[in-house]
Image (cartoon, helix red, strand yellow):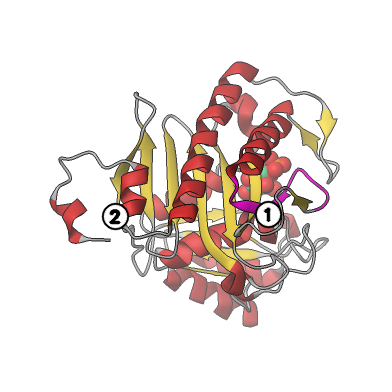
Amino acid sequence: MSEGINDHTRYIVDLRRHMWMDGIEVELRRLIWQIAVVGKYISAKIHESNRKLAGFKNVYGEDQLALDRISDDILKNMLKNSGFVREYASEELKEIAPIGQGQEKYIVTADPLDGSSLVDTNLAIGTIIGIHKNSVFDCGRNSMVAALYITYGPLITMIYSAGKGVHEFVLDREGEYVLSEENIRLNEKGAIFSPGGLRRDWTDSHKRYIDRLESDGYKLRYSGGFVPDINQVIIKRGGIFSYPALKKSPQGKLRLLFELQPMAFIMEQAGGRATNGKEDILSLNVTSVDQRSPIYIGSSAEVTMAEKFLSQ
Ligand code: AFP
């Protein structure tokens, strides 16, 4: 990004202007912009829902809020009409949906409303998006060109990366996404840890790793929402989120395509790392849409430490 923006923070820089100044290609920036706008509609639906469960299950058999499906529909329809997207892969759908004519540039992956089971508690939730140029059945490093997430909390914030750093925008009262932090960079080491899964289901090596973080004085910060839990690592400039291999589910809980790859893309762009314990998340080959993986994601000191513990 040009130095100009940091020099002139008194001027408001909105998302479209930022992407233009960053030199992101026109179709990609229009696509990112349109997805960010969908965040406003999803947020309106969250407010309208009044925290009610709809009582049906998603394709993985999990209880689902009507909100998940509504968010998915809004997003899918927008992408269909954008003219930039040939395929749409969503956590709410069993298969990848062809939504374009076939020659559009991008494939979009989405978890339209992650953490929706937290809606009734009024904790933060989010939307996670990956943008791919090539088939998603490859590794993220070969196919991804951008990622973003929107956090619906006390504020609505959007963080995106199109391979040129990580930038945060806040939705202001006029409905404009305004630049709040540019080129976010993690420190080598953080001070918080966010450990997923039940302790009784952890492997011994993972248990030893978490014990070590605790004895080193890391503060526990786990909300149960992937988006806010990752967001705090990024905004606090470091720390670690883990959702490990569990004794009964060696691939953990979180989904590679919809949740892990986009966050790994952003984390790497912020100077952090994401691994399954052995390999970088972005180097893993995706073989099915519902593929899961253990994850250790955050600042590099803690990710490297996790790799050491897991190899013992
Ligand atoms: P849902 O998709 O069922 O709402 O799960 C949320 C989530 O996928 C993710 O947002 C959290 O990081 C993770 O699950 C929390 O899992 P635990 O409930 O096992 O802590």
Decide: few, some or many residues near mark 1? Use Cα within 10 Å; few <14, some 14-19, many ≥20.
many
Question: Label for residue 195?
Answer: none
Q: Which residues are magenta?
A: 83-95
Q: Is residue 94 magenta?
A: yes
Against 240, is 53 above or below? Answer: above
The residue carrying mark 1 is: 86
Element class at badge 2:
helix
Position in image of residue 118 (x %, y %)? 63, 33
Give the mark count.
Answer: 2
Q: Residue farthest to the bottom?
A: 312
Q: What amino acid does circle 1 point to?
A: Arg
Position in image of residue 285 (x %, y %)? 70, 74
The reply to whether residue 79 is visible in this rendering is yes
The quadrant of the rendering that contains the N terminus is bottom left
Q: Is residue 147 left or right of residue 11?
A: right
Element class at badge 1:
strand
Decide: few, some or many residues near mark 2? Use Cα within 10 Å; few <14, some 14-19, many ≥20.
some
